[in-house]
Image: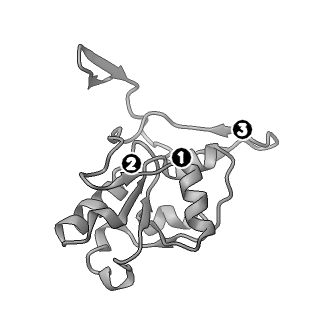
Amino acid sequence: MKPLTSHSAPLDRLPAREHPQQLPKAIRDAPGLYRVDATWGTIQSMQAAEGVRTVGELDMVEHLRQGRPVVDARTREFNAQATIPGAVNVPHPEVTDRLEELDQSRSTIFFCNGPQCGQSRSAIDALLEAGYPAEKILYYRGGMHDWITLGLPTAP
């Protein structure tokens, strides 16, 4: 078990599997049930960075309904498996090279694989370091993990 630190004592987490499954997978012939691997990644903080607001699923749905930008900060390999409809893929290692594709005057939601994935945090850190305004960055910590397990739609 990997130890986690709390305010009073370390907490143990399941050891990583040899071949982790980072996205929940639907269980065949059981609509609404998913197989989830809880052993991969590093649990992320609720707040990505100072001045960056964390949002939930209802915020994401409203943001999309209003036609506002959403960025899937995952690598192409993960984006090809499934993404949130309407999201644009800007992989975290490329985000500063592709700044011209981002509208710094509009609030943009960034997401990745979920609460234990650091890809959107990496993108957000790079953007802030490049001078991107923190108040225009929104962080969907739940990512694809929470989106899928809540039965929300995905796109190929």
Q: Kindly indicate the quadrant of the structure image that contains residue 26.
A: top right
Distance from disc 1 to disc 3, alpha carbons, whole Å, reads: 13 Å
Quarter of the rendering containing residue 149: top right
Look at 23% across and 19% down and name the residue there.
7
Q: Residues within 10 Å of mark 1 (few under 14, many from 20)?
A: many
Q: Answer with mark 1 or mark 3, whichever residue precedes in sequence.
A: 3
N-terminal-most mark, 2 or 1: 2
Task: Describe residue 55's horizontal placement relative to residue 1 as left or right.
Answer: right
- Mark 2–mark 1 Cα distance, whole angstroms, equals 10 Å
Q: Is residue 6 left or right of residue 36?
A: left
Q: Quadrant of the C terminus?
A: bottom right
- Residue underneath mark 3: 33
On screen, residue 33 above or below 9: below
Which of the two residues, 75 or 68, is positioned nearer the viewer here? 68
Task: For mark 2, give the secondary structure.
Answer: loop
Percent across and percent down for residue 88 are: 50, 74
Badge 2 vs badge 3, beta-carbon distance below 8 Å: no
Residue at label 2? 117
The residue under label 1 is which amino acid type?
His
Q: Please tell me whether mark 1 sits on a helix, a strand or a loop.
A: helix
The correct choice, above or below, for 121 with respect to 126 in the image is: above
Q: Residues within 10 Å of mark 3 (few under 14, many from 20)?
A: some
Kindly indicate whether the residue at mark 1 contacts the one at mark 2 (C-beta within 8 angstroms). yes
Residue labelled with disc 1: 145
